[in-house]
Image (cartoon, grey):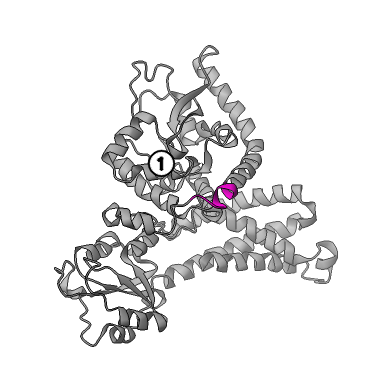
């Protein structure tokens, strides 16, 4: 909703800027600039992408209003550069310097105003989905515990829990809502938008007739796993079972998914190579100047990829050449003393990852996917973490959903937390999701999140 509103306002800002620029004679706009609609759409698209790239459209963002303004200003700088590049590549869309500057100023003002208004109304309970949970046992209580923060509930209002016979109540008493009048009548009385099915045991008799009537009346019905998964962008192990994995939507990379993903990877690689090559040359030069011409610039290392197959990943060397002289694989740690001075910089800026573009071109990796791990770690993690090997259903990626949502991991516990996001990606991956992740990766690079 916010992204759509800002896209429309950004398009309107170009019209406003053109009107201000030719205020004395509006008829000159068409003659000197040309049709405004395609130019307004291009202007809005570039700036909306820039706003997304700095993290302003993340569902669970906890950024303050002041922080959002800072990010928005950075987005307009990036968007302005992007528009200059666009006009160079596509001169027919050029609008003139005066209109461009005015449009950026008007657009930034409209976005700031929209953010202030949105901040005031987004937390109004009347605008949220009204959610009722069927079940009040230990399993249902996970929803209240896992989604306890205000930012976790930005999209919904939890009305309460309807206890079912035969289950031990595990939610606070004030959240219990008896349905003595019948479930469908309770749903109508509370104006429920979505009913979450979370009994302790699905073998308990569900009121199927009432659920059907609720569904036919327009109330959404969703199971507890799907609800939590959707709201947090991760999959809870405690709610999974082999049967659920077998029957759940997703987890299938066949059909047209793989050719589409491969085409997406090749397209992004072609677009990325041109700006990446100068950065790669400068990075290589910095490594040589620090370590000397006799030391390697790149390093390759075995990693586990699609289907558990081992390949060699290519990266810029960011550690000392003797970082693992005893042959023992180790996790990277915070302030790792094996990292060189240049290595700290290129890790922070993710420049050490650039040579992996060639892994993508060769088909061993994808731009987006789970982080590829070393075979020694995979054996250990698969033994300790359930469902770990499901992450090998897709190609590993340079960036990924887990890398965005969880800091750099250096332990089994971290790997388990990241797997919840990896499995969400495996279940939901597709071109649009991949594009969204790439866009958010720009924010990670700009603000240095998760780098080590």
Q: Splitting the image into 4 quarters, where does residue 378 fall?
A: top left
Magenta segment includes 213: no
Q: Splitting the image into 4 quarters, where does residue 180 fall?
A: bottom left
| Disc 1 crowd, CA 10 A, few/some/many (<14, 14-19, 20+) | some
Left or right side of 153 for 93: right
Please say if 263 is above or below 120. above
**Residue 347, how many percent across, how many down?**
46, 33
Residue at x-position 33% and y-position 35%:
410
Please say if 315 is above or below 23. above
Label 1 sits on a secondary structure element that is loop
| Residue situated furthest right in the rendering | 31
Left or right side of 245 for 413: left
Residue at x-position 17% and y-position 70%:
172
The residue closer to the viewer here, 87 or 28, is 87
**Residue 420, how many percent across, how many down?**
35, 49
Q: Splitting the image into 4 quarters, where does residue 102 fall?
A: bottom right
The residue closer to the viewer here, 200 or 138, is 200
**Residue 232, how many percent across, how many down?**
37, 58
| Residue situated furthest top in the rendering | 294
- Residue 334 can be seen, yes or no: no
Please say if 444 is above or below 181. above
The residue closer to the viewer here, 177 or 211, is 211
- Residue 306 can be seen, yes or no: yes
Left or right side of 424 for 93: right
| Residue that badge 1 annotates | 450
**Residue 345, how many percent across, how many down?**
48, 31
Q: In the rendered structure, which segment of residues is drawn in magenta?
A: 253-261
Q: How many marks?
A: 1
Magenta segment includes 254: yes
Please say if 386 is above or below 134. above
Residue at x-position 53% and y-position 63%:
112
């Amino acid at each position: 909703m916010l992204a759509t509103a800002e896209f429309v306002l950004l398009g309107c800002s170009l019209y406003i800027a053109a009107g201000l620029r030719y205020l004395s004679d509006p008829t000159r706009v068409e003659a000197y600039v040309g049709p405004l609609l395609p130019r307004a759409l291009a202007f809005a698209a570039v700036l909306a992408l820039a706003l997304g790239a700095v993290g302003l459209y993340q569902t669970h963002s906890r950024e303050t209003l002041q922080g959002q303004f800072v990010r928005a200003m950075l987005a307009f700088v990036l968007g302005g550069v992007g528009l200059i590049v666009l006009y160079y590549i596509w001169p027919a869309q050029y609008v003139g310097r005066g209109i461009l500057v005015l449009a950026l100023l008007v657009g930034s003002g409209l976005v700031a105003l929209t953010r202030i208004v949105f901040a005031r109304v987004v937390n109004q309970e009347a605008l949220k989905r009204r959610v009722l949970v069927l079940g009040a046992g230990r399993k249902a209580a996970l929803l209240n515990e896992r989604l306890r923060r205000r930012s976790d509930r930005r999209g919904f209002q939890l009305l309460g829990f309807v206890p079912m016979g035969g289950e031990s109540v595990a939610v606070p008493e004030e959240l219990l809502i008896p349905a003595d009048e019948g479930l469908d009548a309770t749903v109508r009385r509370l104006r429920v938008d979505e009913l979450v099915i979370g009994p302790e045991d699905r073998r308990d008799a569900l009121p199927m007739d009432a659920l059907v009537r609720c569904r036919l009346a327009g109330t959404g019905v969703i199971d507890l796993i799907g609800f939590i998964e959707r709201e947090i962008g991760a999959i809870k192990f405690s709610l999974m079972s082999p049967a659920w994995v077998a029957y759940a939507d997703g987890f299938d990379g066949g059909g047209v998914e793989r050719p589409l993903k491969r085409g997406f990877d090749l397209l992004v690689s072609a677009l990325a190579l041109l700006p990446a090559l100068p950065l790669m040359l400068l990075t290589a030069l910095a490594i040589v100047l620090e370590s000397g011409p006799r030391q390697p610039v790149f390093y390759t290392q075995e990693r586990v990829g699609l289907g558990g197959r081992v390949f060699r990943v290519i990266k810029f060397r960011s550690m000392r050449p003797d970082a693992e002289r005893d042959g023992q694989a180790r996790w990277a740690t915070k302030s790792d003393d094996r990292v060189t001075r240049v290595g700290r910089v290129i890790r922070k800026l993710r420049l050490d990852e650039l040579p992996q573009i060639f892994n993508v071109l060769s088909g061993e990796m994808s731009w987006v996917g789970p982080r590829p791990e070393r075979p020694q770690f995979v054996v250990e993690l698969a033994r300790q973490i359930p469902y770990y090997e499901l992450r090998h259903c897709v190609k590993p990626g340079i960036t990924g959903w887990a890398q965005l949502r969880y800091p750099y991991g250096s332990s089994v516990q971290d790997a388990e937390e990241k797997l919840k996001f990896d499995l969400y990606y495996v279940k939901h991956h597709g071109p649009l999701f991949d594009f969204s992740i790439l866009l958010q990766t720009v924010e990670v690079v700009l603000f240095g999140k998760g780098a080590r």
